[in-house]
Image (tube, rainbow, N blue to C red):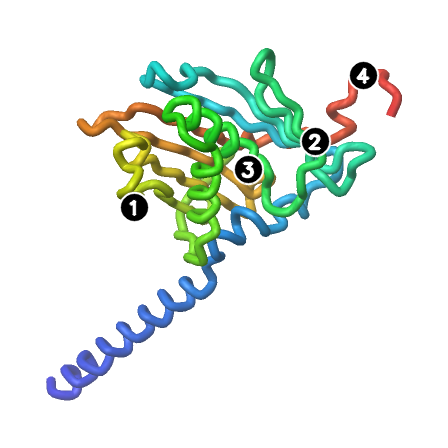
Amino acid sequence: MISVSLRRLSAAPLAACVALMTASAALAAAPISVDLVFYAPHFQKLENGSTISYSFVRKSEDPKATPSFEDEVKVNVGPQGAEDSVRIDLFTGDRGQVLGNMSKTGNPVIVAILEEDVKDMQKTLGGSPFYFRTKLREALAAQTPAEPTKIEFDGKTIDGWKVSIKPFQDDAKNRGKLREFAERSYELTFSDEVPGGLYALKTVTPKPDGGVLLTEELRVKPKVVKADAAAPSGAAK
């Protein structure tokens, strides 16, 4: 009885030590937020000419902001004649913009979407776009480890990393001007197993009563189109 009790007592601290070491190892292995957003080589597994597609959904109840809409964003990796860069087809139709010669470092679709976010906040709240850009850049440049998470992608569960920020929450001086946007949150989810590294970018602007004033979500689609597949039948290559 005594020997069994001693074994149990000695095993308890050992188990706690192992758990602590495992947690510490996981924390040490976690990528830093700024690296995931701006510096990770998210395109290194993709051939030049590959195209990644994202769905984009915006839901807004703010009459001053851009209305709700759904659209698509495409990222062309290493387009012909500019193989060391990325081209982004940001939305379609009247909203469509082509952003060429974007850096292959990180995933520039993040910067493209956040720049649209800055424009919308400036339109809705007034003030300087430089203020919004600076706050976003400072928050995303934090040297904090990303959080491990699970992602449902293409019919399976995969490992990922999550970066969560609230860039305006601590700005007491401008809180009144920011209105509901003071509590605006951004969540970026990454995984090495999704094309382009970025799984989703989601923003939520809550109402004071607990409802939601505005949400936006960019989410990657599973299929990557190769250059040959994108060429029309019979077209010269």
Residue 138 numbered tag? none
Cα–Cα span, label 1 and label 3: 23 Å
For the C terminus, give its image quadrant: top right
Mark toward the start of the polypeptide (4 vs 1): 1
- Which quadrant of the structure image shows residue 93? top right
- Outermost residue, left side: 1
According to the picture, the residue beneath numbered tag 1 turns out to be: 170
The secondary structure type at the circle numbered 3 is helix
- Image location of residue 215, percent across then percent down: 37, 26
Amino acid at circle 1 = Asp
Q: Is residue 221 above or below residue 107?
A: above
- Image location of residue 124, percent across then percent down: 39, 22
According to the picture, the residue beneath numbered tag 3 turns out to be: 111
According to the picture, the residue beneath numbered tag 4 turns out to be: 233
Do labels 2 and 3 touch, CB within 8 Å?
no
Left or right of 101? Residue 134 is left
Cα–Cα span, label 4 and label 1: 55 Å
Q: Of circles 4 and 2, which is in front?
A: 2
Q: Residues within 10 Å of mark 3 (few under 14, many from 20)?
A: some
- Outermost residue, right side: 236
Amino acid at circle 3 = Val
- Which quadrant of the structure image shows residue 90? top right
Mark toward the start of the polypeptide (1 vs 3): 3
Q: Of circles 4 and 1, which is in front?
A: 1
